[in-house]
Image (spheres, rainbow, N blue to C red):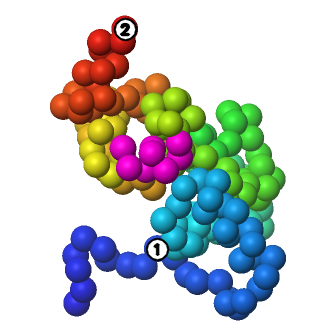
Amino acid sequence: MGDPRKPRKKWSPPGHPWVKERLIEEMKLMGEYGLRNKREIWIAAAMLRKYRHRARALLALPAEVREKEEKALLNRLYEIGLVEKDATLDDILSLTVRDLLERRLQTVVYRKGLARSIHHARQLVTHGHIAINGRRVTSPGYIVRRDEEELIGYAPTSPYFKKALEQQ
């Protein structure tokens, strides 16, 4: 039956385990984004694969049929910050894993300057020091939406919150 909190696998491993170029690229991504393991890269790749597959399927449809679904897909990707407002399906097909990794909470916390390093950002998130609009989020892989980006800060119960208040 399985654990009800984890209903399905969100990733698939690479087809061949020992491709040197892929291994080097994955190690660079792990270091640059402070990831725990390669599974986090594979999860991002699977999400991206799903969006790109949907875009390719829409391109195959006639123009009058695909218009509504295309708009919905583009709005969804705009909300999570992967594409701009005036994007097309070709922009979805040109997305990379780096684009999705930039939208993770861990990366956004580091880019906002709330942490000294990308690894420190991961620790702040997992230990509950980071909140979005006052709600504590403890998952470093949380995909931050555009409207949530400016609401990220220290949790009110965190000692970092008190230090930030003292410094202001």
Residue 32 in view, yes or no: yes
Residue 79 in view, yes or no: no
Instruction: Report how many numbered discs are placed on residues in the image.
Output: 2
- Most distant residue in the left direction: 157
Image height check: is 66 above or below 132? below
Residue for point 58% across, 83% down: 13
Q: Is residue 156 left or right of residue 144?
A: left
Query: Does the magenta portion include 8?
Result: no
For the N terminus, the image quarter is bottom left
The mark found on residue 82 in the picture is none
Q: Is residue 33 left or right of residue 92?
A: left
Image height check: is 134 above or below 13? above
Locate residue 161, reporting x and y percent: 28, 25
Q: Nearer the viewer, residue 58 or 165?
A: 165
Image height check: is 1 above or below 4? below
Magenta-tinted stretch: 117-124
Q: Nearer the viewer, mark 1 or mark 2?
A: 2
Quadrant of res 6: bottom left
Residues at marks 1 and 2, CA–CA distance in whole angstroms: 42 Å
Residue for point 70% across, 62% down: 28
Locate residue 71, reporting x and y percent: 63, 45
Label 1 packing within 10 angstroms: few (<14), some (14-19), many (20+): some
- Amino acid type at image mark 1: Lys
Q: Is residue 156 left or right of residue 16?
A: left
Locate residue 105, reporting x and y percent: 46, 45
Residue for point 18% across, 31% down: 157
Q: Nearer the viewer, residue 145 or 22?
A: 22
Query: In the rendered image, which residue does mark 2 sit on?
Result: 168
Q: Nearer the viewer, residue 124 or 88?
A: 124
- Most distant residue in the top direction: 168
Query: In the rendered image, which residue does mark 1 sit on?
Result: 10
